[in-house]
Amino acid sequence: MNLIKIYYYLYYRMYKISMSGTIKSLSKFYAELLMIILEVSIASSMYIYYVIYINRYAKLILYSWKVFVFIFFIIITNYFSFNKKTDYYIDLFDNMKFNKKIKYEIIIWLIVFMIFLNLIFSFYLMSKIDWSLYRT
């Protein structure tokens, strides 16, 4: 069990979840969108920790070119990661033994839970700071 397989299994689960929706032809798009949301959540919490612990004067505007370049980079990376290999990994994980699937399920849901818990905790830490001392 390596990190790449876990990453693709996470995509596979997002794909299977989106297959239960009404528009099944867009399920790969929805799975990639959910992966982008998770990756942006990780990056957001990392930026918040940077602001809290290293540079409290840092400002990031949501409509700046830095944010657009970062999100564009994530989209392009996901596109090339999932474009040709998805069918192979979907078949691989569909034919996987139940015991192995359970292990992957536990790992990926722990990862998703930890990502969102980390984001919530970073917002909590950010709320404890008196920002009037640092902003002009």
Image (cartoon, rainbow, N blue to C red):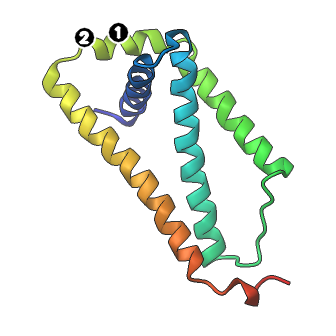
Question: Quadrant of residue 109 in the image?
Answer: top left
Amino acid type, label 1? Asp
Looking at the rendered structure, which numbered label has been put on residue 22?
none
Q: Secondary structure at mark 1?
A: helix
Residue in the image at 68% along x and 28% along y? 76
Residue 16, horizontal then vertical, whole percent: 38, 20
Left or right: 83 as drawn, with respect to 101: right
Of the 4 image quadrants, the one containing the N terminus is top left
Q: Secondary structure at mark 2?
A: loop
Q: Between marks 1 and 2, how big is the CA–CA gap?
A: 6 Å
**Residue most toward the bottom?**
133
Q: Which residue is mark 2?
A: 95
Question: Quadrant of residue 91 in the image?
Answer: top left
Q: Which residue is mark 1?
A: 91
Whether label 1 touches label 2, CB < 8 Å: yes
Crowd rating for badge 1 (residues with CA inside 10 Å; few <14, some 14–19, many 20+): few
**Residue most toward the front?**
22
Residue in the image at 62% along x and 21% along y? 80
Residue 104, horizontal then vertical, whole percent: 26, 33
In the picture shown, does residue 76 fall above or below 123? Answer: above
In the picture shown, does residue 101 fall above or below 45? Answer: above
Amino acid type, label 2? Asn
In the picture shown, does residue 65 fall above or below 97? Answer: below
In the picture shown, does residue 60 fall above or below 125? Answer: above
